[in-house]
Amino acid sequence: MTSMRKHERGEGKIGCVVSLLLLAAASALVIKVVPVLYSNNSLASAAEDIGSRTGLISEASNEIRVKAITDQIRAKAVELEIPEILQKGAIRVEVFGDHNAGTCNIKLKYARKIDLYGIYTWTLETDKTISRPYMDAR
């Protein structure tokens, strides 16, 4: 039983290099995309919380509530560094009911461009409608 593989050493450098390149490319993609997705989800979660607290906004008219909710969402967007939401029409708020109980509808519609190292630009479009009932908890 003589071995025919007498001169083979069993080294697989090409497979290792290809695997490392794929891992590096995936890591670079994750570094660019995950923060954008996280900030979008954080803004949507904050909008849900703000909509739920509509009843706590003074006993003013619905127009004043709409402005207060819009301002709170914009402040959160500035905190999360989402400048696209500051454009006109990106936030639409409707409040139905009075200060005791009602429904708050919030629509977030904007697009964010993610530059993937100059190779590709991905546009992440957010079109989320949030409808939250509210009650005065005082």
Image: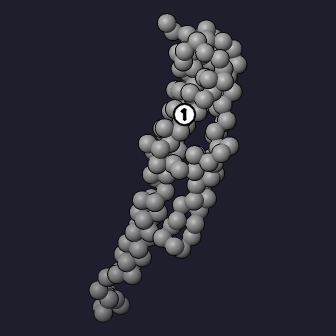
| Residue 80: quadrant of the picture | top left
Q: Nearer the viewer, residue 37 or 77?
A: 77
Give me the residue at 42% from left, 59% from top.
31
Percent from the top left, x then y, of residue 48? 56, 29
Classify 45 as above or below 21. above
Name the amino acid, label 1: Asp
Give the class, few, some or many, for how many residues have Cα within 10 Å of label 1's Cα (few <14, many ≥20).
Answer: few
Classify 43 as above or below 124. above
- Split into 4 quadrants, where in the image is the N terminus? bottom left
Percent from the top left, x then y, of residue 103? 66, 19
Residue 8 is left or right of residue 65, and the answer is left
- Spot the residue most to the bottom: 7
Q: Nearer the viewer, residue 89 or 40?
A: 89
| Residue 101: quadrant of the picture | top right
Q: Secondary structure at mark 1?
A: helix
Residue 16 is left or right of residue 80, and the answer is left
Give me the residue at 54% from left, 18% from top.
57
Rendered image coloring scheme: one colour
Percent from the top left, x then y, of residue 36? 49, 52
Circle 1 sits on which residue? 71
Kindly tell me whether residue 38 is visible in this rendering. no
Percent from the top left, x then y, of residue 20? 37, 72
Kindly tell me whether residue 14 is visible in this rendering. yes
Give me the residue at 56% from left, 27% from top.
68
Q: How many marks?
A: 1
Give me the residue at 62% from left, 48% from top.
87
